[in-house]
Structure formats: structure tokens, C-alpha cells
């Protein structure tokens, strides 16, 4: 997404579209996987599809409830939306780093946000779907408040409080990065895309 100032509605529309693309990918590629396909990694120390999704679920579980509380508090204060989106310098740097393809610049996840095991239940797919629902709902609620004025604590760097605009964008880019990683795992395992049954 461009870093130049743009309309709040366009910014949220673009993020909402990315969430819907993530939902479509999850339904098409992950929902019908067997336990073996979900849990088989491409090699030692490399994450499986299930581990990619669990990592997203862990991070979403930290961010989404806080974002929801902050948006609700802003609504109660009578906040009204700004016409244009503002970004913070650090928030944008973090988002830009997330956009660099993993093949070019791997990012090591802090241990506390890494998947808990190598054999994960199919519920990781369902939890991810519910988190997409929650993120979609938060993007909708954010249309009624000034996102530029809301600060979200960063769970990895406790003293960092990026704007809600940056937190939303970072979360979406983080999802895209790991969903692409999960797709590469499936492609490497020779798992083809599910054909929709009409």
C-alpha cells in the first residue's frame, strides 16, 4: 500500500479486501487438508502449514482484543473518523520490513510467538477463520473513529505504541507473508488447489 496520505475509506477498503483474499485462500487451500498435509513441514526447522497458521493465531490473539478495546473506548469518547490516514515513522518501517519477501529477508519470530508444537489439530484452520472474522469486524468498526489518534501497544516491543492505522496494516501484511509461506509449503508437498464443487 502507498505511504502517501490517502483517504481513510480507501485505506480501510483496501485492508478489508486483503482480509477477504486471505479468507478465500484459507478456504481454498487449507480447509480440506489432511492432518498429515497440515503438519508436514518442508524440512528440519521449517514450519508446516499448521505452524504458519498457529503463529498467525498467536499474534492475532495478542493484537485483536487490544484493538477491539481501543476502538470501543474511542467510540465511547465520541471519536469521529478523520478524512485521511496518518502513519507513524516506526510503524511504517515495521510494515515495510514485513513487505520484503521472506526469500530476500527472513524475519526470525520471537520464541514466545512461535508455534507450540509440530503436530497441530485442525482447529488451527478454524481459529484462523474466526480471527479473520474478528479483523473484518474491527476494520468495519474503525470506520466510525479517528484511527490516527488511537495507539496500540506492540506485543514484541513493549515501549512502542504505533497508531491503529499502522497496527492494522502491519497485521494484514504479516498475514500475507505467512499465508504465502504456507502456500509455498503446500506447493512443495505437491498439494494442488482444491476444486470447488458446484
Image (spheres, grey):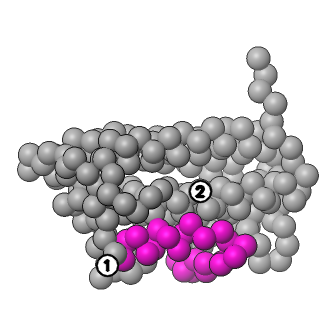
Residue 60 in view in this figure: no
Residue 64 in picture, x, y percent from top left: 39, 55
The circle on residue 176 is 2
Give the residue at mark 1. 160
SS for dot 1: loop
Residue 198 in view in this figure: yes
Q: Residue at x 81, y 65 (%)?
A: 41
Residue 148 in picture, x, y percent from top left: 23, 59
- Magenta segment: does it hold 75? no
SS for dot 2: helix
Whole-angstrom CA distance, mark 2 to mark 1, is: 23 Å
Residue 10 in picture, x, y percent from top left: 37, 43
Number of residues whose C-alpha sits closer than 10 Å to that of mark 2, classed few (under 14), some (14–19) or many (20 or more): some
Residue 16 in picture, x, y percent from top left: 45, 42
Q: Residue at x 56, y 49 (%)?
A: 128
Residue 43: image quadrant is bottom right
Q: Residue at x 77, y 77 (%)?
A: 45
Q: Is residue 40 left or right of residue 172?
A: right
- Magenta segment: does it hold 94? yes
Number of residues whose C-alpha sits closer than 10 Å to that of mark 1, classed few (under 14), some (14–19) or many (20 or more): some
Up/down of 67 relative to 7, above or below: below
Q: Nearer the viewer, residue 113 or 178?
A: 178
Residue 138: image quadrant is top left
Q: Nearer the viewer, residue 140 or 42?
A: 140
Q: Are marks 2 and 1 in contact (CB under 8 Å)?
A: no
Quadrant where the C terminus lies? top right
Counting labels gives 2
Q: Nearer the viewer, residue 132 or 166?
A: 166
Which segment is the magenta one?
A: 90-112
The circle on residue 177 is none
Up/down of 37 relative to 141, above or below: below
Q: Residue furthest top?
A: 198
Amino acid at each position: 500500500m502507498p505511504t502517501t496520505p490517502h483517504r481513510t475509506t480507501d485505506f480501510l477498503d483496501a485492508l478489508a479486501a486483503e482480509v477477504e483474499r486471505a479468507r478465500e485462500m484459507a478456504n481454498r487451500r487449507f480447509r480440506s487438508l489432511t492432518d498429515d498435509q497440515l503438519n508436514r513441514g518442508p524440512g528440519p526447522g521449517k514450519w508446516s502449514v499448521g505452524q504458519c497458521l498457529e503463529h498467525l493465531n498467536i499474534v492475532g490473539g495478542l493484537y485483536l482484543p487490544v484493538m477491539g478495546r481501543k476502538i470501543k473506548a474511542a467510540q465511547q469518547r465520541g471519536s469521529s473518523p478523520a478524512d485521511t490516514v496518518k502513519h507513524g515513522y516506526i510503524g511504517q518501517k515495521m510494515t515495510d520490513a514485513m513487505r520484503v519477501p521472506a526469500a530476500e529477508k527472513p524475519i526470525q519470530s520471537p520464541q514466545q510467538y512461535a508455534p507450540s508444537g509440530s503436530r497441530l489439530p485442525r482447529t488451527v484452520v478454524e481459529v484462523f477463520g474466526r480471527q479473520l472474522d474478528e479483523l473484518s469486524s474491527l476494520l468495519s468498526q474503525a470506520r466510525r473513529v479517528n484511527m490516527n489518534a488511537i495507539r496500540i501497544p506492540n506485543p514484541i516491543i513493549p515501549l512502542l505504541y504505533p497508531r491503529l492505522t499502522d497496527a492494522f496494516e502491519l497485521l494484514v501484511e504479516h498475514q500475507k507473508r505467512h499465508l504465502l509461506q504456507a502456500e509455498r509449503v503446500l506447493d512443495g508437498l505437491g498439494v494442488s488447489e482444491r476444486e470447488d464443487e458446484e
